[in-house]
Structure formats: C-alpha cells, structure tokens
Amino acid sequence: MNFSILKDDYRTKKADCLILGINSNYKPSAADSFPEEIKKIIKQAFDEKTFTGEFKSVRHFTISERPYFCSSILLVGLGDSNEQISSVRYKKMIDAVYQQIKMQAYSSITILLDGFIQNRSCSSCIKSFVGELSFQNYRYTEYKSKPETPYNPDIAFATVEDDAEEALAYSTVLKDAIDEARDLQHTPGNVGNSVYFAGKAKELENKYSSVSVKILGRSELKQEKMSAYLAVCSGSSNPPQMCIINYRGAGEQVAPVAIVGKGLTFDSGGLSLKPASGMDEMKYDKCGACVVIALMDAIARLGLKINVVGVAAFAENMPDADSYRPGDLITARNGLNIEVANTDAEGRMVLCDAISYTVDTYNPEIILDLATLTGGCIVALGHIATGLIANDDNLAKELIAAGEKSNDKVWRLPLDEEYQELIDSKLADITNSAGREASPVTAGAFLSRFTGNIPWAHLDIAGTAWNSNGYKHPTGRPLALLLEYVVSKAGK
Ligand code: BES
Ligand code: MN
Ligand code: ZN
C-alpha cells in the first residue's frame, strides 16, 4: 500500500473510490460541501435507508455520471457525531473499510479525512488508518509457490491539516518496521536460526552510518562468563548469537536506552520437553529479539536524537546429550548461582546474562527487556495487554502512557518484596522456576536481580507477540509502543 497526503481539492484527483465517513445524524443540507452528485447519493441512501450511518457499516455506490473524478464512493458509518469512538472501535471500523476495498480491488483510493476525525486529531487518524490497513494487508508468502497477487493500492488522505505529512512519515516508518518484524518472526526454525538473524542484524550496519553491530558467539560468551545463556544453547548445534545493535543519535557521553529482546529461535523446552501439541508455536519464541532488530531499523531511519543499544539475544533450546539438565547449578555472569529447576524456563537464563552484560558494558540510563517469557502471562492477561513489570514507577508510567498512545497496551503486574522470596533456592541463590503460581511475576523477580540499580522494565509479550487462533501469525507487538516511547524520550 502506498499512502500519500492530498492537500489540493480532492476533486482534482482521479480515484477508483472516494471514501467518506458519515454520521448517523448527518443532515444533507445546502451548507454541505460535497459535490451535487455525491450529495444526491447520500440523500437517497438515507431516504431509502440503504445506509443509515450506523457505526462500522459500509456501503458502496457506483457513480453513474461519467466521466467523474471518482468512479465509486464508499460510505462508512460513524454512528452519532456526539459519541466518542474508542481506539478499539475505531480500528474495527478501519477493518470494515479494509474488507470492502480489498473485495472491490480498488487501486486508487481517496479518503476524505475530515469526515473521520470526530473527536480525535488528524495525525491520530492517519496513524490509525495506515497502521490498521497495513496490518490487515500484510501477507507472509515466502513459502507459497503460488502466492495470491499482493493488493497494493495507492491511498491518498485528503486533508488540509498541517501535521498530516509528519504523521504519515512516522506511520510509514512504523508500518515498514512492523512488516519487517513480522517477516523475521514468521521465519521457521529450520531456516531462521541464530546465525540467520545475526546476519539480519548485521545488515543494519551497512544501511546506516549511525549504527554499529557486534555479534557475540559461543567463545565471546564464554569469555564473558555468561554461563546461564550458554547453558540454554548447549543442546543445540546452533550457536548463541547475541547481537548488539548500537545506534548513536546523541553525544558520545549521553547514556543510552538499552532494549534487550529474547530470541529463542525455537524453544522445545529442552530436557523438560514441552508437550507436542502447540510446540510448533515455539518458533515465535524469538519475537522479542525480532522486534529489537526492526525497532533499531526504525530508530535509525528516523534519525532520532538519542542513543539506543538494542540487544537481540538469539539461542535455541533443544534436548540433546549436551543439554543442560534440571538440577544443574549454574553461576551467572553477575556471580549469582542459579538452580535449574526446569530447562523450559530458559528465557530468563538467556536474558539474565544479556541484561547484566548490557548494564555493565553500556551503563544505560534505562534498560527494557521484551520476552515471550511465561505462559502464565497469557492466563493472566490473554492476548490483549502485554504484561509489564518494573522496578521504577516513573518508567512504568511512561510505558503505560506510550502503550495507550500507540494503542499497544500494557498492564502492570506487581513486584513486591514477598514475590522475591518465591525464587529462593535451597541449594543455590535463586531458582529458575518457582512453579505455576504467579509465574510472570516470579520470572520478573528473577530478571530484577540482574539489572543493578538501573531503572528497568520488563515486557512479557507471551500473549501479544502472536495470534494463535485460526491462522497463526506474529503481530509485531510491542513495536508501536517502543517506538512511541523512544521517540518521546528523544524529544525531551
Ligand atoms: N517461551 C515459553 C513461554 C510461552 C509459553 C510463551 C507458551 C507463549 C506461549 C517459556 O520459555 C516457558 O516455557 N515458560 C514456562 C516457564 C515455567 C517452566 C516456569 C511457562 O511459562 O510454562
Ligand atoms: Mn521455555
Ligand atoms: Zn521460551
């Protein structure tokens, strides 16, 4: 989809379809700005009740007068103009628009944005339309011998608002990054191994002079005493690849924001093997790290005035003669001894060393991590909000706000002292699994031991990184949230 802003009179541009947002309390009056031909259609539709402006309803009309600047119009119902439309419902309305334009296969479309603004800003309308239309239109066709022809219409937003171009520029970078993240996330475990993704991370270095990329493999991790991270990889023939993507947009002295993503290219559970049913979905256990790669691409493309260190920590958790075992006692990079209660609690083993390395090496102002960490997070929050755990109230607040603004929501879970006791180990300092009770929180408590005194927030994206109903697909979440957060941070 190619999006553009149309500042000129929309009647000067030819289009297959003109899209109009119409309220249920719409009164076709003399003051109305629509051209006669279109006003006539709307009036007749209302008179005959074929279109009532009911929220989310869509109705397509062919224009009989030829030649005309548009060959059809699509009326989109927005309900009563006095009613506030939530972002969630607004998105559903855009989904209805998508279904129609795809079905009709329009190749040039003009959206009269003014009609869709209703209690929101022009820029938020543009962000919603570009985000949702692109999300719906995304297809992963890499392994289809006969892929469906891509639907690639030109879509112009007719508006005179000053901030339209800026909103579109941002939305374009965001949707490209989300598409990129989803491509990476879709890549199956047999192809998308750690070395494959390290190559993808490395590409950013050639693409941007502001980016440098360092890859730590088995021997580098050994040198750094990252035994917890290494333990997870010991049963796999794919080496660990810790990809450090360093973006410099501010002065050398400015402390960076660090963002660490869990990148399990496949999580079989290891010797604590997962059940067969649903195991295929564990190729999505790399979603966090894939978001980090695409996010760094977006940050560099926007040229934000901020320093960001993105860490994509790739590994594979497999059962093998060399696998780490339940009962193993392992000393992590920061000296903490870990009792391995369950080899399937591998995400925290990878992240703990990646976090402590990042804190010590880059002394970040803030450190975030994102991980498909616990099935318990899906039980708690379903597929709607990402779980948030933080050791800093202000950081938590900022992330919640960025989530609201980007419509990529998070919900904070507790990290009270009592939870820390649950990860005590009889044999070592901490256990990697405290069982099912409060598992997203105990996983967070585990990670909190490796952050030093740095403000830290953990995003458990187990429920939001992919969709397992019907056609299984990754979502690219929480890319929108993180880009929003980093942009607002860079602006300060
Ligand atoms: N990657 C999984 C978490 C997961 C499971 C995400 C299902 C999405 C869907 C993680 O490595 C894991 O296995 N977690 C265990 C931890 C437990 C052993 C303490 C879990 O949540 O069951
Ligand atoms: Mn696991
Ligand atoms: Zn996992």
Image (cartoon, helix red, strand yellow):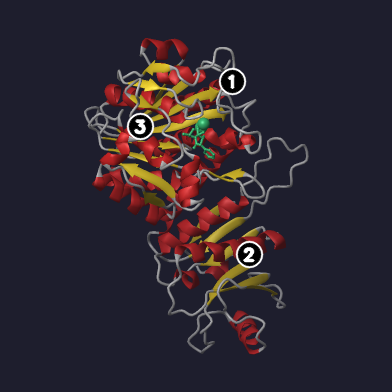
Badge 2 crowding class, 10 Å Cα cut-off, few under 14, some 14 to 19, many 20 or more, is many
Element assignment for label 3: loop
Disc nearer the start of the sequence (2/3)? 2
Residue 99: x percent and y percent?
65, 61
Farthest front residue in view = 426
Residue 15: which numbered mark, if any?
2
Viewer-proximal residue, 461 or 106? Answer: 461
Callout 1 crowding tier (Cα within 10 Å): few <14, some 14–19, many ≥20: many
Rendered position, 283 above or below 17: above
Disc with the residue nearer the chain's start (3 vs 1): 1
Residue 262 visible within the image = yes
Q: In the drawing, does residue 16 fall left or right of residue 387?
A: right
The residues tagged by marks 1 and 2 sit, at their Cα atoms, a distance apart of 58 Å
Look at 42% across and 59% down and name the residue there: 164
Asked if 24 appears above or below 441 in the picture, the reply is below
Return the residue at label 1: 319
Residue 341, labelled with which disc? none
Q: Position of residue 483 (x, y in %)?
A: 40, 44
Q: Secondary structure at mark 1?
A: loop
Q: Which residue is mark 3?
A: 423
